[in-house]
Image (tube, rainbow, N blue to C red):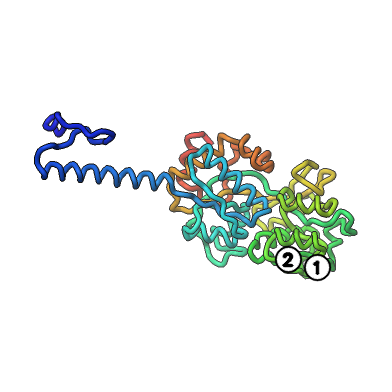
Amino acid sequence: MFCRKFSNLHIKNSPVSCYLKSSKREEKMISRILLAAAIVAGLSGAASAQTISIGTNPQGSLAYATGAAVSKVAIEEGDIRMRVVPQGGPNVVVPLVNNGELEFSIANGVAAAFAYTGQGEFSSPNENIRMVAVLFDLYSGFIVRNDSDIHTLQDLQGKRVASDFLTQQAVQTNAEATLNTVGMTYDDVQRVPVPDGVRGVEDLETGNVDATFFSLSSGRTKQADAALGGIRILPIEKSEDANAKIEAISPGAWVAEVKPGPNFPGITEPQGAYTTPFVILAGADVPDEVVYNLVKALHANKKALVAANGAFNGFDPAAMHTDIGVPFHPGAEQFYTEAGL
C-alpha cells in the first residue's frame, strides 16, 4: 500500500498521511496529490458559497417582503446563501428565471400559469419555470382615501384610476378582473398610467389618482394608510357570479372574504377581496438539492416566516404542493414525496 511503502513519512495538517523523502520523482507525485486535493476543496467551497437570487416586485410590495422572509429562512435554516433582487412584476421577473438569470422568483398563481403557457401579459411560453411552493393567499383590491366619496366599484366611473402597470402587468389583469365583476372596464374610468403598484399607491398619496389597485397587506399599503389618515378598500361581491366573471379574465383567481385585522388596513368589516395564491418559482436548471433544502426549510419554519412577514400567518405547510398548472421542480417533488404531501 502507498502509506505502508512510505510509512516513515508524515505531513502535518494534510489529507495525505504519507510523504516521500527520497527521490524527486516521489516528491513531485506528492505535490500533484496535494494540488489536486486543494483544487477539489476549492471547487467544493465555491459551490457551497454560491449566492442564489430570488426576484421580486419593487421594495414596498408584498412580494418583496415575502422574498425577504423566504431569504431569511433559507439562510438561517436551509444553509442557502440567498439574496432578494427587486425588479418588477412577474412579466419582468419570471422571464429572468426562465432564462437562468435568476434562480427563484415570487409570483401570483395566475401570472405563473400565464407565464408557463404564454398567455396574458406573456408573449411566449416560459417553459423552463418550475413550481416550488404555494405560500399563502394574496388579497388585492381597489384602494381609496378614507375621506373619498368613492364607496363602491361602480363609483369609480369617470374617476382617475391608476392603470397599465407596465412593469407589473399582473396588477392590471387583477384590476380588470375586479372591474368585470360589476360589468365595468378601464374604458369607464380615467386611466392614469403608472409603472407598478407601488407607484400607484404613491400617486394616491399625492392626489394624482382617486383610486389604485394593489395588495391589501403590502408594506406600502400600510404606509399609505398612515400617511393619509386612513384608507378604504372597495368591497367585491362574494358570489358564484363574481367568481365566474373574475375567472373569465384571471383563471385561478376568486373572491374570498377578508376580515379586519392589523395586516389589512382599510378593512373595517368582513368583505370580499380579489384572491390568488402567492407562489415561489424556480428555474428548471436550479440544482435539485438547493430546491429541496429550501422547501424543507420553509415547511418546517412557519413561525420564523411569520416573524419576518405577518402575511405568512396564512401559510399552510400542508398546502405547499397545490397544483396551479405549472410542473413542480424535481427537488420540490422529492421533499413533498418524502413528507407524504
Residue 122 appears left or right of 154? left
Q: Quadrant of residue 44?
A: top left
Within 10 Å of the Cα at label 1, are there few (<14), some (14-19), or many (20+) other Cα atoms?
some
Tell how many labels. 2
- Whichever of labels 1 and 2 marks the residue nearer the N terminus, that label is 2
The disc label shown at residue 163, or none: 2
Q: Which residue is mark 1?
A: 189
Query: Where is residue 142 shown, x and y percent of the image?
Result: 78, 57
* Residue lying at 73% horizontally and 66% vertically, measured from the top left: 163
Whether 224 is drawn above or below 70: the answer is below
The one nearer the camera, 105 or 74, is 74
Secondary structure of the residue carrying tag 2 is strand
Kind of residue at badge 1: Val
Name the image quarter holding residue 166. bottom right
281 over 195 or under it: above or below: above
Using the image as rendered, state which of residue 17 and residue 153 is in the foreground: 17
| Amino acid type indicated by mark 2 | Ser
Q: Is residue 22 visible?
A: yes
Quarter of the image with the N terminus is top left
- Callout in the foreground (1, 2): 2
x 16%, y 32%: residue: 9
Q: Where residue 304 sits in the image (x, y, percent)?
A: 61, 36
Q: What whole-number distance in Å separates the C-alpha atoms at marks 1 and 2?
A: 10 Å
Residue 149 coordinates in the image, percent (x, y) = 90, 59
Label 1 residue SS: loop
Q: Residue at x 60, y 56 (%)?
A: 86
